[in-house]
Amino acid sequence: MQRKLVSSGTGWKLYMPKDVLKLLGFNPNETEVLLKIDKNKLKITKADPDKNNQDLLIKKFNRCGNGYGIYISNSIIQFLEIDPELDEVKYTIENDVLNISKAVL
């Protein structure tokens, strides 16, 4: 699926339907997720509550309309080489990982 990022404070938000999060087994009200960047892709996976995650980027989804959003800082957007004013992002699901990358039109 492709989406536009929405400005949110000093960064950007990506909104997604609740059904997408359910496919991943995420309870958006409770699940903490781990963000990693790999080859111009932002990979979002469930954070392991048993591990010491203090050095990792952990986020939660926020309720937004009929779906949920995740805040992405400007520095992450720059690493992904996305111009949020012009570009759309695409997200795919592979092996219980939500991959976000720049959409190529």
Image (cartoon, rainbow, N blue to C red):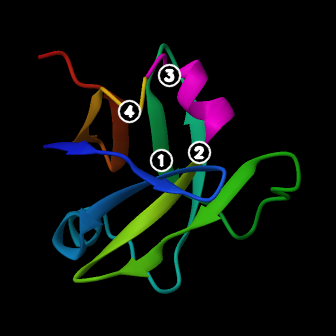
Whether 22 is drawn above or below 91: the answer is below
Crowding at dot 1, Cα within 10 Å, few <14 / some 14-19 / many 20+, comes out as many
Q: CA distance from mark 2 to mark 3?
A: 13 Å
Report the label total.
Answer: 4
Residue type at mark 2 is: Leu
Q: Which residue is mark 4?
A: 85
* Residue type beneath disc 3: Leu
> At 68% from the left edge and 57% from the top edge, which residue is drawn?
58
Of the pair 6 and 96, the residue shown nearer to us: 6
Residue bearing the label numbered 1: 44
- Name the residue beneath numbered marker 2: 35
Residue lying at 31% horizontally and 27% vertically, measured from the top left: 86
Q: Quarter of the image containing the N terminus?
A: top left
Magenta stretch: helix, strand or loop mostly: helix
The crowding category of the residue bearing disc 2, from other C-alpha atoms within 10 Å (few below 14, some 14 to 19, many at least 20), is: many
Callout 4, which amino acid?
Glu
- Report, in whole angstroms, how far the alpha carbon at label 4 lies from the one at label 3: 14 Å
The residue that label 3 is drawn on is 80
User: Magenta span covers which residues?
Assistant: 73-82
Q: Is residue 5 above or below residue 84?
A: below
> What mark, if any, has residue 79 been given in the picture?
none
Image depth: mark 1 or mark 3 in front: 3
* Front of the two marks 2 and 3: 3
**Distance from Cα at disc 1 to Cα at disc 4:** 22 Å
Give how far apart the Cα atoms at labels 1 and 2 are: 5 Å
Marks 1,2: beta carbons within 8 A: yes
Q: Nearer the viewer, residue 33 or 1?
A: 1
Closer to the eye: label 1 or 4:
4
Regarding mark 2 in the picture, which secondary structure is present there?
strand
Q: Is residue 75 left or right of residue 5?
A: right
